[in-house]
Image: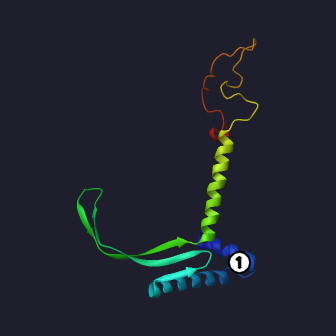
């Protein structure tokens, strides 16, 4: 999602023009940045905490040459999500786990040890079905 998407969504919900909404969104971002620079912390309830933290100087390695390089001390912005955001993200994990479990469980009427359409006219199994010669549709619809 981009800033433009955020502006469009908010302007539709609130009833302001996109230009007015863009100014409000930009001023909000500017206020967050200024607060971080001055106070080094901003807490937004039910969203999260932005904080400026110093990162110590360290020795790193140039991956191309293998040479050791000194990385100076610097300040970085960190974000810790709030409880509400964490809960919604966990819901995504739970939904994905359910989707994976549902797709890996074969339907009750199919015997997982015997491939479908693998018996001849006598009802005996002819062994595992051979793979198709080429692509036969979507791979994720099995």
Q: Is residue 110 above or below residue 48?
A: above
Q: Horizontally, is 26 left or right of 118 in the view? A: left
Q: Which quarter of the figure is the C terminus placed in?
A: top right
Q: Is residue 14 above or below residue 119?
A: below
Judged from the image, the secondary structure of the residue bearing numbered disc 1 is: helix
Q: Position of residue 75 (x, y in %)?
A: 38, 77
Q: Position of residue 103 (x, y in %)?
A: 67, 42
Q: Horizontally, is 32 left or right of 60 in the view? A: right
Q: Quadrant of residue 10?
A: bottom right
Q: Give the residue displayed 52% in from the left and 71% down from the top.
A: 80
Q: Quadrant of residue 120?
A: top right
Q: Position of residue 33 (x, y in %)?
A: 50, 82
Q: Quadrant of residue 62?
A: bottom left
Q: Give the residue displayed 45% in from the left and 83% down from the top.
A: 40
Mark 1 Cα shell of 10 Å, populated few (<14), some (14-19), many (≥20): some
Mark 1 — residue? 11
């Amino acid at each position: 999602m981009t800033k433009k998407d955020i502006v469009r969504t908010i302007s539709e919900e609130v009833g302001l023009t996109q230009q007015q909404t863009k100014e409000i969104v930009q001023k909000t971002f500017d206020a967050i940045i200024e607060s971080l620079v001055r106070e080094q912390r901003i807490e937004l309830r039910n969203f999260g905490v932005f904080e400026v933290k110093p990162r110590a100087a360290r020795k790193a390695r140039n991956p191309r040459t293998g040479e050791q390089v000194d990385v100076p001390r610097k300040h970085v912005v960190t974000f810790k999500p709030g409880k509400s955001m964490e809960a919604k993200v966990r819901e995504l994990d739970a939904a994905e786990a359910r989707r994976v479990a549902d797709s890996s469980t074969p339907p009750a009427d199919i015997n997982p040890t015997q491939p479908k359409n693998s018996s001849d006219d006598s009802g005996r199994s002819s062994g595992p079905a051979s793979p198709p010669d080429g692509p036969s549709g979507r791979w994720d619809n099995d």
